[in-house]
Amino acid sequence: MENRTQEIECLLVDVKTCSKMLGLGLRTTYRLVAQSYREQSPLKIFRFGTAYRISRKSIENFVAGTTHGNQNIGG
C-alpha cells in the first residue's frame, strides 16, 4: 500500500491570510470582516470564540465581482 500525503486546501482562512489574498492592509481587512460578519455579505464569515474565519470561496467571488453591491471599506 502506498502512503500518499495529499495537500488539503482549507475552506476557511484567517484574517491575516484573507488580507494577503486581497492585497489589503490588516486594518482594512478587519473592517471588511467586521462589516461582512454583521451583514453576512460580501464575505461569508464564521466566528469561533474570538477568532474569525472567512470562506475562501466568498473571497474568490468577491474579487470576481459575483457578490452583490460595491463596497467602500475603510477611509
Image (cartoon, rainbow, N blue to C red):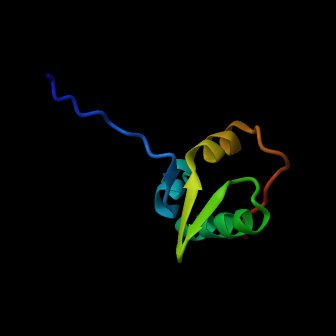
In the shown orientation, is residue 26 left or right of residue 3? right
Q: Residue furthest right?
A: 69
- Percent from the top left, x then y, of residue 2? 15, 23
Q: Closer to the camera, 37 or 32?
A: 37
- The quarter of the picture where the C terminus appears is bottom right
Residue 24: name its quadrant: bottom right
Q: Residue furthest front?
A: 1
Residue 25, above or below 3? below
- Percent from the top left, x then y, of residue 74? 71, 68
In the shown orientation, is residue 63 left or right of residue 16? right
Q: Is residue 24 visible?
A: no
Residue at 76 percent of width and 69 percent of height: 38
Residue at 52 percent of width and 52 percent of height: 12
Q: Closer to the camera, 73 or 39?
A: 39
Residue 72: name its quadrant: bottom right
- Percent from the top left, x then y, of residue 29? 60, 63
- Percent from the top left, x then y, of residue 50? 53, 77
Q: Is residue 46 visible?
A: yes
In the shown orientation, is residue 52 left or right of residue 42? left
Residue 62: name its quadrant: top right
Residue at 54 percent of width and 52 percent of height: 23
- The quarter of the picture where the N terminus appears is top left
